Image (cartoon, rainbow, N blue to C red):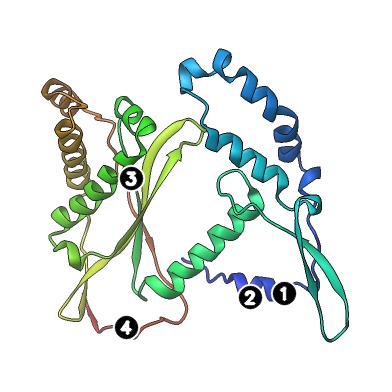
Amino acid sequence: MLRRYSWEKEKDKLQHYRRRSPENSPLYQIVFHSRDDLQFQWEARFQHQYGCLRDEVLKTFDEYLNCGILAHGAARVYCDGCKHSLLIAFSCKRRGICPSCGAKRAVKFAEHIYSEVIEDVPHRHTVLTIPKRLRVFFKYDRKLNTILFRAAWGALSQVLGVDEHELAAIFTVQTAGEALNYHPHLHGLFADGYWRNSVFTRFGELELKAIEEAFAERVLAQLHKQELVTDDDVAQILSQDHTGFGVPVPRSLARRGMARRPLPRQRE
């Protein structure tokens, strides 16, 4: 079930503003005391495995260390009613490392998807993964992530037997696994049915193996086109019982609450 969660509603529950103290958190202390050591020791200790330390990483750390700290910039807010004023520290608005900014960004994005994008119909959540031996290509060339998106969309459209413009889906790439290892994979939310002539028709039982095979063939075809894998590589991967490509059983989700747009009539 998708739980109705509104950033504005949660914000309205607050009786007054209370500044958080990020400088007291364990994460802040780790970054504060280790940021310079990371820069100076990266080449000797980590570069052989992870490549060069990108400037963006250090910039993100620096902005995180300034986030929520009054000394690094603040806005003064004033109440015409009670004549009270206070300072609100600037935020870094960074995702990934900052728990505060990341949480707000996630909630507002989820609220936008819920209220402005998805229809009031059943949905399914799915995950699409790729073999370990292919992940390195996506690690050093993030533009290749486009291959994953197009392959996922095309595979679903092909196996479900609908035109791509009749499929309603949202995909996002996640680059880390549970062990924080580099593990690019897609999370997807798609309507459990399709629209044709304003009529919504539910999908039947999903052929997961067929979706997995179609996804694998499309990804490998694009990597082969860019000369990142050979014919032998493709044949060897597809000949394995467990190719490394995966499509776990999609979870069914029912959208609750008022639909933003009128729901078209449905049929099973």
> Dot 4: within a 10 Å radius of its alpha carbon, few (fewer than 14), some, or many (20 or more) residues?
few
Say which mark, if any, is on residue 9. Answer: 2
**Which residue is more in the foreground, 120 or 49?**
49
Question: From mark 4 to mark 3, how far is it between C-alphas?
Answer: 29 Å
> Dot 1: within a 10 Å radius of its alpha carbon, few (fewer than 14), some, or many (20 or more) residues?
few
Mark toward the start of the polypeptide (4 vs 3): 3
> Dot 2: within a 10 Å radius of its alpha carbon, few (fewer than 14), some, or many (20 or more) residues?
few
Question: From mark 3 to mark 2, how far is it between C-alphas?
Answer: 34 Å
- Residue in view at x 34 percent, y 86 percent: 262
Residue 58 shown left or right of residue 1 in the figure: right
Local secondary structure at mark 1: loop
* Residue position marked by numbered label 3 in the rendering: 248
**Which residue is more in the foreground, 115 or 69?**
69
Q: Amino acid at mark 2?
A: Lys
> Dot 3: within a 10 Å radius of its alpha carbon, few (fewer than 14), some, or many (20 or more) residues?
few
Q: Amino acid at mark 1?
A: Lys
* Residue position marked by numbered label 4 in the rendering: 263
Question: From mark 2 to mark 4, how far is it between C-alphas?
Answer: 25 Å
Q: Amino acid at mark 3?
A: Pro
Mark toward the start of the polypeptide (3 vs 2): 2
- Residue in view at x 17 percent, y 46 percent: 210
Say which mark, if any, is on residue 13. Answer: 1
Mark toward the start of the polypeptide (1 vs 4): 1
Dots 1, 2 in contact, CB < 8 A: yes
